Amino acid sequence: MELIIDITLLTFLGLTALAINRIDKLFCVIMLSGIYSLLCASLFVTMDAVDVAFTEAAVGTGIATVLLLSTIGATETEQRSAPHRPLFALLVVCVTGAILVYGTMDMPAFGDPNAPIHQHVAPRYVQQSQHEIGSDNIVTSILSSYRGFDTLGETVVIFTAGLAVVGLIGFRGMQKFGDRQRAAGVTQNEMEQHLVLRIVIKMFIPLILLFALYVQFHGDFGPGGGFQAGVIFASAFIFYTLMSGLDAAMRVVSPRTLSYIAALGVLLYGGVGIATMLMGGNYLAYNVLRHDPLHGQHLGIFLIEVGVGTTVFSVMVLIFFAFSSRKGLRQ
Amino acid sequence: METFLILASTLCISIGVFLGITGAVGIFRMPNFFTRLHAASVTDSGCASMLLFGLMLQSGFTVATVKLCFILFFLLISSPTAGHALSKTALSCGAQPTPLPREER
């Protein structure tokens, strides 16, 4: 049964990839890429990797689609056809693909219990994490305690991405955009006539925020954590922006505040590491935070998840603001 | 009781699957935007809620049922809203809710 599901999902995945390649309309491509990551998320669920599936569904299907849509709002909606036939690129892709396939020949089969990855540290994670970390969700204890360095790196990557987008696109036109809108007497946007949409969005925003907080603080026990929670929290803000316009959303949190919050999240994460060093442990070894090592682990994981969540949230909203303000400039 | 529940849930899931397949066929075969939207929203609300209801019957009085109820609640609000927004936008973009003559297709 699982085999049938896998084959079906993989077939759809291949078909979607082909369709993305063939279609010139960028709007369709974005929708298809959303479908693609939803299919990926389903595949992860069949592999019992619910945490990864959750992240893929929230990031790939949710926020990435919205960000891409806001991008094509500022650019063109048709893909320009290449002036020449890119045969050389095809050759490079084929050779690289063949090398990659050749490289996987030596790898152990999927799910092989004797594979090195299942022999090295995984047994300790599975058997000891309850005693060492005390978290019910092994994924959370690996992600934020055993592999805290890697997660710190990921958070910094997201922070850097936000910095890069703001640095490249910037908010230079933002002030002008608001002024011009006010000068033209355009204070309300087209959502004004969508009464049903506005009411439903108003109804959903608090629920989405609540769900984000649940995902944030329930990560110890079930799938979830800072990354997903930040993205869900950001999606509520994006909803609000769609409903009442960029101007109103920026009055809730200005881009300046958002960039401070983003930096604050990374600082909190790194600061926990410094604190553990000052208290006599290694960097990001939460055991020393409290007298009871398990309580220390709990506190440490809690703090760094908050750091991850705030950074992800503010970077996502920043990127969305940056792209949307470009759209306003073009008009 | 057990057999009855299984039968009822099988019936619900079959209806859901039927609605899903007809909806998918409808999206491809219907003549214009609004009829296609109708097919799509049948899939969204009818098919999904029948499937969820069938799953609820199977899971009994557990936390899973409560979660399914939440999902059903969100789907029943969000998918008609999406359909409404789509049709309203199509209307304001000038699409007419009349079927095209056959030869123009």
Image (cartoon, coloured by chain):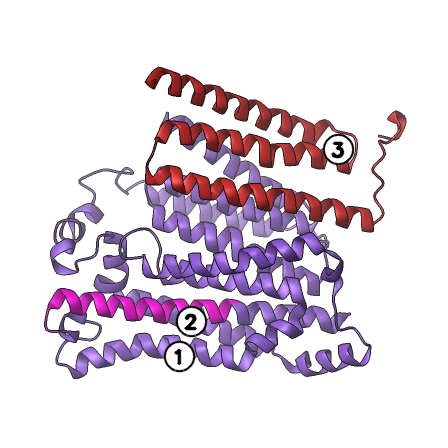
Chain colours: A purple, B red
A284 shown above or below A146: below
**Is residue A113 one of those drawn in magenta?**
no
* Host chain of mark 2: A
Q: Position of residue A91 (x, y in %)?
A: 54, 47
Q: Nearer the viewer, mark 2 or mark 3?
A: 3
Q: Can the viewer see residue A8 in this picture?
A: no
Q: Are marks 2 and 3 in contact (CB under 8 Å)?
A: no
Marks 2/1: CA distance?
7 Å
- The residue drawn where x is 47% and y is 33% is B52
Which residue is the site of mark 1? Answer: A264
Q: Is residue A149 left or right of residue B52?
A: left
Which residue is the site of mark 2? Answer: A311
Which residue is the site of mark 3? Answer: B35
Same chain, marks 2 and 1?
yes
Same chain, marks 2 and 3?
no
Task: Please name whichever residue, B68 or A299, is drawn nearer the observer in this view of the structure.
Answer: B68
Secondary structure of the residue carrying numbered label 3: helix
Q: Quadrant of residue A129?
A: bottom left
Kind of residue at disc 3: Thr
* Host chain of mark 3: B
